[in-house]
Amino acid sequence: MLVHFDLGALASEWPASVVAIGTFDGVHLGHQAVLSQAVALAAEQGLPAWVATFDQHPAAVLAPDRCPPSLATLGENLQVFERLGLAGALVLRFDQAMSQTSATEFLDRVLIAGLRAQTLVVGHDAAIGQGREGDAAWLAARIATVVVPPLELRGTRVSSRGIRELVTLGDVEAAAALLGRPYSMAGVVVRGQQLGRTLGFPTANLALSVRQALPLGGVYAGTGQTVHGSFPAAISVGARPTVGGEPTIEAFLLGYPGMSLYGTALRLEFQSRLRGQERFDDLGALARQMARDVERVAELAHAWR
């Protein structure tokens, strides 16, 4: 998939395209319905399907005190775009200048002149331009526009807000059902207190690059995607009542061969919540519980295969 971050550097040689527009935070099943429609329409017409999106949630500029935490990194969003069959993604910087761009300018300069849009595909609540002037009806009056209705799954409307709520409640299985994949968090591995190593369970401590929705504190079964492959993971989120210290996201990777992960990228996928946070009388009791957690992760990982 082609990826461009600079409209000025984009030299479009294709005659026309189908373009999906949106913030697409997390690229959940509702977003995927919009993007898949764009891909299908483009295939019918022998045209490339593009997505026009932003590098951050518009609220980060327009209302930073109310900006919700992300459901995924930009990199993960781009990976999902590619899996869905998009030919390219134009990732625009959302700043004060972009927030003041009129709907007409965005349509003419970005979508039509930049991406050669012939048809737009948008969600029911999509809008472009300052003050969200260019809603679906406004777009449809100026260019061929397909409006995809909201998606419901077993009576629940799929939305980024709803998925965030599920994540913060620790219901990562329900969140995964609406995302179409496990909820994950990505960052780099940094040094921690190295307490897990002394207890026989060395953990990788995750440092994030964006403010992301944090699962409810506790221990989760999941998977760790490392530079050396994928491994079942016992993931701990939040403060550690027994030993104290700052809240952390750390994971013990079952079967990991032991090479240092410091400074490398790590993505943790949350499959299910095992238990809440607990305070233990001593480190021995903590180590025994960690052993039970790891055993349970191993059992679940066998079922995932």
Image (tube, grey):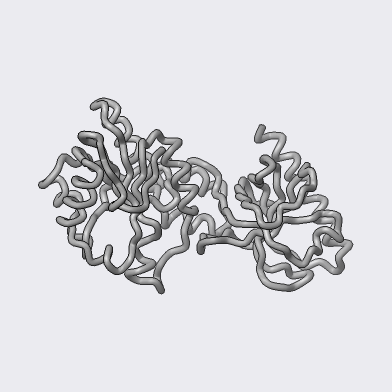
Quadrant hosting residue 223:
top right
Query: Taking 263 as reference, is 118 left or right?
Result: left
Q: Which of 123/76 is in front?
A: 76
Query: Taking 45 as reference, is 72 left or right?
Result: right
Q: Which of 162/233 is in front?
A: 233
Query: Taking 252 as reference, is 165 left or right?
Result: left
Total of numbered circles in the picture?
Answer: 0
Q: Position of residue 72 (x, y in %)?
A: 49, 53
For the N terminus, the quadrant is: top left
Residue 106 vs 59, above or below: the answer is above
Quadrant hosting residue 152:
top left
Residue 205 vs 1, above or below: the answer is below
Q: Position of residue 160 (x, y in %)?
A: 41, 54
Name the residue located 86 percent from the left edge and 59 percent from the top edge. Answer: 199
Q: Position of residue 185 (x, y in %)?
A: 57, 54
The residue positioned farthest toward the left in the image shown: 141
For the C terminus, the quadrant is: top right
Name the residue located 26 percent from the left edge and 52 percent from the top edge. Answer: 126
Name the residue located 67 percent from the left edge and 40 percent from the top edge. Answer: 229
Instruction: Report if residue 236 is visible in the image.
Output: no
Instruction: Report if residue 157 is visible in the image.
Output: yes
Q: Position of residue 181 (x, y in %)?
A: 52, 42
Residue 237 vs 245, above or below: the answer is above
Name the residue located 78 percent from the left edge and 70 percent from the top edge. Answer: 243
